[in-house]
Amino acid sequence: MRVLFINSMRAFGGGEQWLLEVADGLVARGHEASIAARRGSALSTLGRKHGHPVFEFPMRGDADLESIVGITTLMKRGGFDVVSVNVQRAVRLGAVAAYFAGIRAVVERRGLLFRLKNTGRNRFIYKRLVSRVVVNCEAIKDDLASSGVVAGRQMIVIPNGIDPSRIMSAGDGKLRSELGIGEGTRVVVIIGRLVPDKGHGVALDAFSRILAGSPDCCLLVVGAGGLRDELERRARPLGTAVHFLGHRDDISAILDAADVTMVTSFREGMPHVILESMVAGTPVVATRTAGIPELIEDELSGLLVQMHDPHGTAQAVLRILNDSGLAQRLAANAGRRVRSEFSLDLMIDRVEACFGEEASAAMRVER
């Protein structure tokens, strides 16, 4: 099976991580995977490092004829069985190109909860161009169904998965030494792009309350994005207790140094950082949004809080910091849960089966 993945994002996030993991997994099983990415994107660079053929296009907007023509030509030459589109611009560009190239197996992967507008264009795309929609949680499926644009039978839920070996223990203390963090200091971490949806402002407000209740704490803010200057200004009253680390590739070391992972997002899907924390044995405090309650069983494998609630978030973090038994129980339950229900192999099994079904259905229609 030959699969072309199309992604229009410039930055690298959870959707791009999913794409690379699926592409790698399919290739390991004897399939072929190519990537059409935005010119100069992080995905282009990483896709090549992973050994996949990568083709770059401007992807400047929905009416980018250069990209549509280029992707259509790529599809005609590549003999692809399935086109996988991720993120709305890639959906619109890729689905149109697939139509002109004569490819009918077009699978959208949607990993973020955001409203799909019931417009004529969207109805056309999902009734005529996109054959299947893969969502990573029931919350996104329900939201899409309520839009009236995507039929329930057109969707399939495939939860995110993780390879535990990707998050290895890195307990050599180098990160704490690098940052000048004392041995007795408790570490809270928030990992994610510095964008409004991640709720970093709530996280900083929560941490000010955490610091009042537990002065021997520090906060690591891991990630890059346009809000960094604003967030650094907001964090100045907290002094040296807050460390902005920018983008980091050593997530294992970050989580190994952390006592709690804090997720304060307003809009999500099924965040990789939660899966990573569950594997690493770092207890999680996270908001009740999108697929997060499908990952974390409140009080069993993590603690859930309401969105926009710095007080409730701070109280949940302090519970974990002040109760080692609770922290150990949450971490142990989370580790067992993610290994049994959210493994990478299981996710790739399901994606492979979905792509195969779509390719076979398209072949039957052609005949």
Image (cartoon, rainbow, N blue to C red):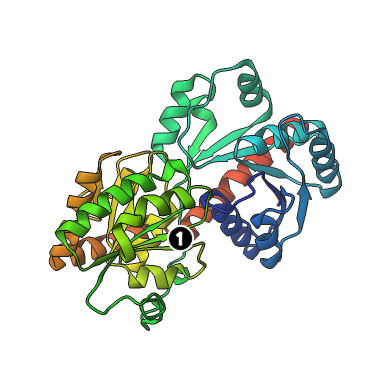
Residue occupying the far top of the picture: 120
> Residue 19, how many percent across, how many down?
59, 53
Q: Residue 322's quadrant in the figure?
A: bottom left
Q: Is residue 238 above or below residue 114?
A: below
Q: Residue 216's quadrant in the figure?
A: bottom left
Give, as a three-letter code, the residue at label 1.
Ile
Q: In the picture, which quadrant includes the C terminus?
A: top right
Q: Is residue 234 above or below residue 261?
A: above
> Residue 270, how many percent across, how many down?
42, 47
In this rendering, position of residue 300 left or right of residue 341: left
- Disc 1 is placed on an element classified as loop
Crowding at dot 1, Cα within 10 Å, few <14 / some 14-19 / many 20+, comes out as: many
> Residue 250, how many percent across, how many down?
48, 70
In this rendering, position of residue 40 left or right of residue 223: right
Q: Residue at x 71, y 48 (%)?
A: 38
Q: Nearer the viewer, residue 155 or 310?
A: 310
Q: Nearer the viewer, residue 10 or 161?
A: 10
Residue occupying the far bottom of the picture: 172
Write down the residue under mark 1.
Answer: 162
Q: Residue at x 20, y 52 (%)?
A: 209
Q: Is residue 50 above or below residue 177?
A: above
Q: Nearer the viewer, residue 336 or 191?
A: 191
> Residue 133, how many percent across, how many down?
56, 35
The total of numbered circles placed on residues is 1
In this rendering, position of residue 214 left or right of residue 131: left
Is residue 339 visible in the rendered image? The answer is: no
Is residue 122 visible in the rendered image? The answer is: yes
Q: Nearer the viewer, residue 25 or 243?
A: 243
Q: Residue at x 42, y 74 (%)?
A: 168
